[in-house]
Each structure stands twice: as C-alpha cells, then as structure tokens.
Amino acid sequence: MPSASTEAPTTVGATASAPATDSRDARGPRDSRMAPGGPGYRRMSFALFLAGVATFALLYSTQALLPLVSTDFGVSASEASWTVSAATGGLALFVLPMSALSERFGRRTLMTASLVVAVAVGLLVPFAPSIGALVALRAVQGAALAGLPASATAYLAEEVRPKALITAIGLFVAGNSVGGMSGRVITGWVAQEWGWRVAVGTIGVIAVACAVAFRLLLPAPRHFTPGSLRPRVLVRTVRDHLSNPLLRRLYAIGALFMMVFGGVYTVIGYRLTEAPFSLPQGIIGSIFLVYLVGTVSASTAGRLVGRLGRRGSLYLAGGTTASGLLLSLADSLPLVLLGLVLITAGFFAGHAVASSAVSHTAVRGRAQASALYQSAYYVGSSAGSTMGAVAFHAGGWGGTVVLGLLAVLGVVTITVFGSHAARVQSRRKPAPAH
C-alpha cells in the first residue's frame, strides 16, 4: 500500500477558525492546532486516553467472565460469547450514523453523550435476569459506545497538527488497551470473590469516573465546522470512501487484525480453566495484564512507521501476531503467556498504524472514513468472538489458532497486493516534462 502522507490536509474551516493572535511569518500562516508540548495537548491526550479506557472496559466487560456467565445461565461458550459479540456488533452497526451526528453536533458533544448512555446501561447490566436480557443490554451499550471511536479520531485529525497525529491516535488506542486490561483484571478478581454481576457493576462505576474526567478535561474544538445531516450527502461521502482502494484495504486489515484479537481473548479464559492449567478466575483475569504491551506498541506506532514505513510496520505487526499464535499452542503456561504478549503487541501496533493511515488518507468526511474503519474493525471483533468460540468448541485451542493464522495471512496478502498496486500506479505516472 502506498504510504500515507504525514501532511494530510485538515477539514475545511481550520484556518478560518484560528485565533486572531496567530500571525503569518515567512513560511505562511502559523498552525494553531495542538502539538506535543503546546497548550491543551496534555489535557486533550489524557481526556481521550480516559475515553479509550472507558470504551474498552465497558465494551469487553464480560469477556473475561464468560466461563462464569456460562455456569450462571447454563449456556455453552458459543452462546455466552454473544454477550461480547452483541456489544461489538451494536457498535459496528451504529458507528456510521453516529459519525454523521458528530459532523452536525460536534465531536465533543457526541462523545460525551455516548459515554453517558453507555455508562447508564453498564449500571443496569449486573441486574440482567437472563442470557437474552444480558445480550440485549450489551447490544444497546455497544450502540451507545459507537459515538466514541470515529468521533475521537476525527477530533484529533481536526485539532492536532499532522506530524503529531499518529502519536495522538496511538495514545487513544493505548487507552483502549489499558481499558481492556484493567477491566479484565479487575473483573477477574472481583468475580472470584463476589461473582460476575458485582464485577461488571464495578466496571460501570469506574467508567462513570472516566466519563466525568473526560468531559472536564477535553478542550473545546477550535477547528470543527458543522456538516450536513442530509442522507444524500452521507451516502455520497460513504460511496467516495468505499471507492478508494487504499481505504478499502485499510478497512479489511483492521477487521482481520481484530478477528484474531477477538477470537483469542474470547476463548482464552475457557482454555485456562481447563487442564493442564486449571487456573482460578482471579489469575485468569490477571493474564490480561499483557494488555500493557499493547499500550506500549500502540503509543510507539508513529516511530515504527517512521523507521519501517506503513507497509513494513504492517508486515512486522502481522509476523509478530502469527508468532504469538503459534507459541500459544504449547501446554506450557510461560509459553502461552509469551504468545499472548506477541499477539497483543502485534495487534495494537497494526491497529494504530491502519487507523492513523485512514485519518491521513481521507481528505473530506474524516468522521465517516474513521467510522467505516471502526465498523469494519468491530465487525471483525464480533465475527472473531463468535467464530473463535465455535472453532474452540469444534477443535479446541488449535481451532482458534488456525482461525487467527488465516486472518493474519489475509493481512499479509492485502498488504502485498497494496505494494503491487502502488508500483503499478507509479509506473503509470507520466515522466516530468523537461
């Protein structure tokens, strides 16, 4: 795939909304957007980091608890996995409409509203009387959370200078990894003592604190220009994005990476409760501390792209993920843990690279471009959660690993095809006139 420019233009209206104190110099107008070390950048980074924490903690709050959910309701692993798939599926279904609302009402407004609704539903989840009611509540929660991912990346694309964009998005993705890790670790130990219902209620309370801090810290947007809610405009924007071959490849890569991740982490709890491991729920929850590796790999994605380029970074991420999958086949707990570390590092690096490339590539309708990526990403998560559980039921952990390796092969194949397409396109360009 051709490398995305690090100098992608921002949305229309950015220059017009610059403060009057910004003056022109010999190099042109001063860029009033946020940059590392500049005013508001740390507040913005921490606010979106907390939003990422709340999003992943709520979205995957039942994933580490699936064996307990199965026991409580008397259902199989594949049936219990729908408590994860319904949430990610709801997010995938509603992320595009939510992105359209953010174009009209603003990124910060929509992100705040999404967090409020998701947190409110999260406080109801512990009282679900049946597996059907639990799945329904999780679907509503996922739909509410749909307002966050695309709006956050669009906010960053508008408010942060282009050279700092990959790093800023990496920090948001790092918040996702911390949320996923802390949610699973906390729920594991709480559930061991008081059951899964108290565990998911605890996550709801933590998400309340994150939501309040997010709203207080996030700077007001300075470069947002309201768009239209007309369906015809939205359809045209979506059609333009889907007609872009590079964006289509990035969407597919996001979906395939998330299919691996969703499948592995939906099933790993079942594997570790069985022989030869037979681990208690608290220890299984602590396994998710490996998410900290994802925090590091996502936040350093900008430097990785600077050294290897986007395609090289995706090859490295795919190879790392595949190595982790193969290592996890061992019946040795240390090797399984090392495999999870590699899977997590590869996934978060690949996700940060692909999602930031979407923001660079889309010149107009960035919220819709990001929404399409997030939709594909969470479709991959939903499919991975369900298919990973089915594969585990049919072939044990080896079945889940085979599913993951096929998805990684898809990432590599798409990246190779993109490299070929870039070479063909460069040969077709006319030589410069002399």
Image (spheres, grey):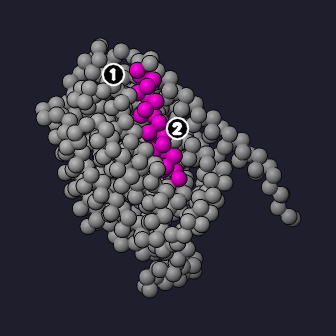
In this view, the residue farthest toward the bottom is: 20
Q: Main secondary structure of the magenta part?
A: helix
In this view, the residue farthest toward the right is: 434
- Distance of mark 2 from mark 1, alpha carbons? 22 Å
Q: In the image, residue 18 lies at what x, y percent?
A: 46, 79
Q: Amino acid at mark 2?
A: Leu
Q: Which residue is mark 1?
A: 271
Q: Amino acid at mark 1?
A: Arg
Q: Residue placed at 41% from the left, 22% from the top?
A: 392
Q: Quadrant of residue 288?
A: top left
Q: Label 1's element?
A: helix
Question: Looking at the image, which is closer to me, 257 or 100?
Answer: 100
Q: In the image, residue 64 lies at what x, y percent?
A: 29, 33
Is residue 293 something one can see in this rendering?
Answer: no
Q: Which residue is mark 2?
A: 256
The magenta-colored residue range is: 372-393
Instruction: Of the two numbered discs 2 and 1 on the same chain, state the one appearing first in sequence.
Output: 2
Q: Residue placed at 55% from the left, 74% from the top?
A: 12
Question: In the rendered structure, does residue 97 fall within the stretch colored magenta?
Answer: no
Q: Is residue 58 left or right of residue 416?
A: left
Question: Looking at the image, which is closer to me, 285 or 132?
Answer: 132
Question: In the rendered structure, does residue 384 fall within the stretch colored magenta?
Answer: yes
